[in-house]
Amino acid sequence: MKWHHVIVVISCFLVAGCFSQSRNSRSELQARNHMDRAAALEDASEYHRAAQEYSVVAERYPAAPYYKTAVWKAASLSIHPANSEIDYTAALHWLQVYLGLPLSSEEKDRADLYVGMLKHINDLESILSAFAVEKVELQAVTQKQSGDIVATTQRLGQLEADLAHAHAELKKMKDVDVRMHRSRVKGNDIKPLERVQKTSELNKDEVKTPVANGHRAPSGPQDFYPYVIQVSSYANKEESIQAAMRSRNKGYSGFISHAHVPGKGNWYRVFVGFYRTFEAAQRAAFEMKKQDYLHAFVIKMPFAVQIGIFSSDKELKELEADLRSKGYLGYRLPDRIYPDKIRLLSGAFPSEAAASEIANALQKEDFKPKVVQR
């Protein structure tokens, strides 16, 4: 009876050992698959996605034989110069994990060097942020003073315009008096009622504000929005569109723009907003860095491709949907001349030539594009 119990216990240990070995084999296979995908992405220069794959191995499979390599790759690729979404925080985290592993003196020295470099970068960014705040404050003071000067100049211009208008009205009244006097001298027999009617006609204002399509054009200067904030970039167009849509869900006016980077091929940049001045864009970018986009920066893109101008929201939405179905993401801006109309635009570009390439592509898709200033 005792030998029977011993045999049962030994069998249980054997089964448990086989199960544990099988589970370890599956975990190692899964870790190997992630490492293979990460290596393929690294070879394709997709450093951001490769770093994410290596991070999966480092987080889930600490017992895998590739763990040490995965931790180092997750750290180094996160700050690779060609990484489109450099992440200093993630790199510092994985370097600290790496330093906790058994390392050779050469590996430890290399990791310490990277950690020191990242901490120095963080210190420099803090200094730059402080300088940026001080610059914004100084610009605010300068802008206020400039605004007071502009307001005074505009008021002076308005007074001069009013004076010129009053002078023109006085001249017209004198012309009427001269004509009436000449009529009386010549003995022209005009009845009192007819004389009043003729005088009224002569006093009508002949200077009218131009009108187009039933909308009165404003007399003020036109507004342009040449500055945008770049928050990320992708080699895959659909990924860039999804990133732009996520920014819209956060309350930003996100859109994308195509760019050909020499030596790297086609990239799709994700932009946010539209600003008249660099200072306004810089302030917005500074706020975005504190909340959602650590690497946001201002760039001048004064041109865009206009798809159309609309007063009907239904027609605008239909064209937006048509544009999206063909792989383009449109965005809206108020029309400069008629504020009750909306312009549907695509992309933002540094030159007319760059915008023309997208305009030609849209024309082939049966749209009626036009290169315009934003």
Image (cartoon, rainbow, N blue to C red):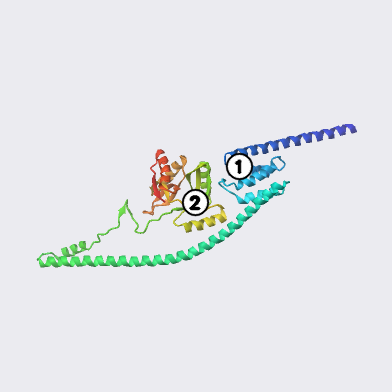
* Label number found at residue 272: 2
- The residue shown at (50%, 64%) is 138
Which of 374 and 110 lies nearest the eye of the viewer?
A: 110
- The residue shown at (42%, 40%) is 361
- Within 10 Å of disc 1 (Cα), the crowding (few <14, some 14-19, many 20+) is many
Q: Reading the chain from its start, which is encountered first: label 2 or label 1? A: 1
Residue position marked by numbered label 1 in the rendering: 50
Above or below, comparing residue 239 to residue 336 in the picture: above
* Label number found at residue 148: none
Q: Can residue 134 be seen?
A: yes
- The residue shown at (73%, 34%) is 22
Q: What secondary structure is marked by label 1? A: helix
- Within 10 Å of disc 2 (Cα), the crowding (few <14, some 14-19, many 20+) is many
The kind of residue tagged 1 is Ala
Relative image position of residue 78 (x, y in whole percent): 61, 47
Residue at the outermost front position: 106
The kind of residue tagged 2 is Val
